[in-house]
Amino acid sequence: MNIGLFFGSFNPIHTGHLIIANIMLDRTPLDEIWFVVSPQNPHKKRNTLLHEFDRLRMVELAIGNHYQFRASDVEFNMPKPSYTVDTLTYLTDKHPNHQFSLILGEDNLKHFHKWKNYEAILDHYSIYVYPRPGDRVNFDHPKVTFVEAPLIDISATYIRDAIQNGHSVKYLIPADVESYIQAKKLFI
């Protein structure tokens, strides 16, 4: 089975993430998308992150019963910060019958050369890239495929700020995620 790994803090997951995941299913040979909740991204500050179990729960609520989406906590028991190459190695060893690929925003591709063992990732895994607002990235490699998708400029930062300021986030996040945030008084 071809599995697309969509890594992220998902702090919170929003409709942009779901739109991109759906487009990747439709326009690539991927059979499933696994939303890998990263407990600690080595390139982000920890003080803005909700607890990893809250973020995982929001991903579970957002994907509901979509049979081709899965929420993954694989990095929760791995050393922190989380490095993509280590997670890929672990998943490949654990699931030898699956072929794993990365789903990456074009903004992350710009800094991909700074990732731990990025050459090993390119040697062994395909990368599907979706466009992000801003400068276009020229990255020519046989394992990198740019996928046509709408430019979605929704950010978790915008959503957190809106919640903190008492503004509506309706349609920016799934209704079940919004209810969870309200019930737990998150981002306030």
Image: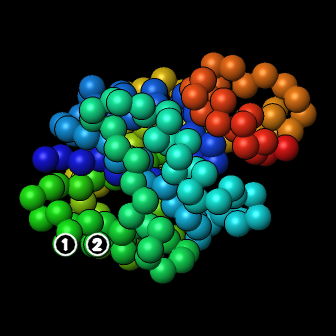
Crowd rating for badge 2 (residues with CA inside 10 Å; few <14, some 14–19, many 20+): some
**Residue appearing at x 40%, y 47% in the figure:** 71
Residue 138 vertical position relative to residue 93 in the rendered view, above or below? above
Q: Are marks 1 and 2 in contact (CB under 8 Å)?
A: yes
Residue 174 vertical position relative to residue 130 in the rendered view, above or below? above
- The residue tagged 2 is 90
Q: Is residue 32 visible?
A: yes
**Residue appearing at x 36%, y 69% in the figure:** 87
How far is mark 1 from mark 2, CA to CA?
5 Å
Q: Quadrant of the C terminus?
A: top right
For the view shown, which residue lies furthest in the bottom direction? 79
Q: Amino acid at mark 1?
A: Asp
Give the image location of residue 89, x and y in percent: 27, 72
- The residue tagged 1 is 93
Q: Amino acid at mark 2?
A: Tyr
Crowd rating for badge 1 (residues with CA inside 10 Å; few <14, some 14–19, many 20+): few
The colour scheme used to paint the residues is rainbow
Q: Secondary structure at mark 1?
A: helix
Left or right relative to 29: residue 153: right
Say which mark, if any, is on residue 144. none
